[in-house]
């Protein structure tokens, strides 16, 4: 088990239609402190990732940024509701 570390790593993996980018920074610290930022919609993975880190790192601050890009048909796509956006953007009239 790793006791402490100061490091930086970045990796990217393409598994069509997903592209996964992970960036990890770690700093010396007395206790384990895991800070995780995930792509919106993948928050359910947070506890699993933190558990994996805790199994391998005894102490330190570990900052992890995970970006998941889904280029498939069912990816995290959104559409703008143009009529509603225009209604919100209209100047207020008295």
Image (cartoon, grey):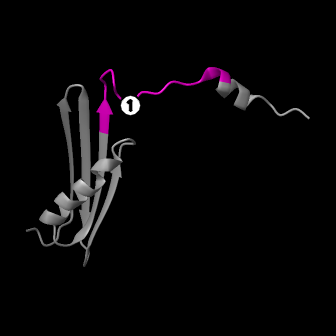
State the image quarter where residue 33 is shown.
bottom left
- Residue at 38% x, 41% y is 41
Residue 92's place in the image compared with 66, above or below, is above
On the rendered structure, is 37 left or right of 90?
left
Count of marks placed on residues: 1
Location of the C terminus by quadrant is: top right
Q: Quadrant of the N terminus?
A: bottom left
Point 18% across, 35% down: residue: 13
Could you tell me which secondary element the residue under label 1 belongs to? loop
Q: Does the stretch in magenta take in 91? A: no
Q: Which residue is mark 1?
A: 76
Residue at the outermost right position: 94
Question: What is the residue that sits farthest to the left in this orientation?
Answer: 1
Q: Position of residue 31 (x, y in %)?
A: 25, 76
Residue 35: quadrant of the picture: bottom left
Rendered location of residue 40, percent (x, y): 40, 42
């Amino acid at each position: 088990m790793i006791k402490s570390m100061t490091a930086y790593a970045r990796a990217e993996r393409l598994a069509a239609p997903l592209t996964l980018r992970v960036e990890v920074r770690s700093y010396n610290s007395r206790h384990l402190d895991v800070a995780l930022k995930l792509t919106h919609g993948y928050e359910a993975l947070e506890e699993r990732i933190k558990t994996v880190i805790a199994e391998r790192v005894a102490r330190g601050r570990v900052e992890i940024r995970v970006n998941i890009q889904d280029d498939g048909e069912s990816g995290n796509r959104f559409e703008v509701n143009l009529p509603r956006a225009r209604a919100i953007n209209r100047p207020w009239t008295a």
